[in-house]
Amino acid sequence: QVQLQESGPGLVKPSQTLSLTCSVSGTSISRNNYFWAWFRQFPGKGLEWIGYIYFSGSTRYNPSLESRISMSVDTSTKKFSLRMNYVTAADTAVYYCARRNTVTMAEAFDYWGQGTLVTVSS
Amino acid sequence: QSALTQPASVSGSPGQSITISCTGTSSDVGNYNLVSWYQLYPGEAPKLIIYEVSARPSGVPDRFSGSKSGNTASLTISGLQAEDEAEYYCCSYAGSSTFYVFGTGTKVTVL
């Protein structure tokens, strides 16, 4: 059973760095055709794609966030991570990790974590 | 890139059919057959229910169906059940510059 679980601080101060990790179980993180993604859902409910990473370390980022984010992957621990610099209150959201599976579908995300709320506040 | 437009809420009685629209532009929905739909319950992991406009992942009931015409995609839930009460979001691929754009979300209420 494929499972993804986000973890990280629930409160980050403005101008600091948000760091989240997603733990993957029930599936290989190193398989060809799997990409590992981050999304967020704002308090007003809108959803936004943040970016994704391949097991090799290759990344694609949302152009609107590219200057502030970086992603990494650790295949030995089956975890991938998100870092977002210089956060503001506008970055307050529920952050989700997910899997993009190009084996059976194009441009869709078939498994998601349950999300973690990150609040940016002093 | 603007969000895709969905109705804020749709409701129906058990057994009825409802349809949720998702309107984009010729740069996203209209240009790619790459619309997906996600079901969200509060505090739970989002669930993929439709991909590539009309395909259903394994395990998703055939009560859920998707379609597209021009710049508008649609999700239809037939034989509405109480457990279908959730939020639904469409998502379209929008090319290698923008990648993905989501809908504004629709709250489905089962009366």
Image (cartoon, rainbow, N blue to C red):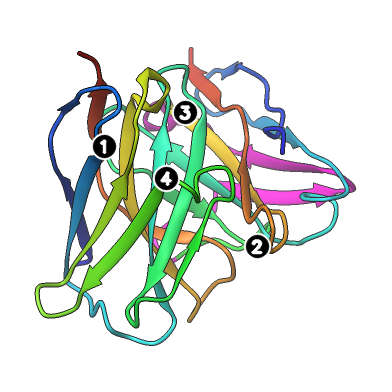
Residue where numbered disc 4 is placed: A68
- Between disc 4 and disc 1, the foreground one is 4
Lower sequence index among marks 3 and 1 = 1
Q: Which segment is the magenta one? A: B58-84
- Name the residue beneath numbered marker 2: B52
How many angstroms separate mark 3 from mark 1 (CA)?
11 Å
C-alpha gap between disc 2 and disc 3: 20 Å
Mark 2 on the same chain as mark 3: yes
Residue A55: x, y in percent?
32, 79
Task: Estimate how packed mark 1 is, as few (under 14), some (14 to 19) or many (20 or more) residues with alpha carbons within 10 Å.
Answer: few
Q: Chain of mark 4?
A: A
What residue do we see at 47% from left, 17% from top? A44
In the picture of the structure, the residue carrying the numbered disc 3 is B87
> Which mark, residue B109?
none
Label 2 amino acid?
Glu
Q: Specify the subunit that label 1 lies on.
A: B
> Magenta stretch: residue B24 in it?
no
**Tag 1 residue:** B44
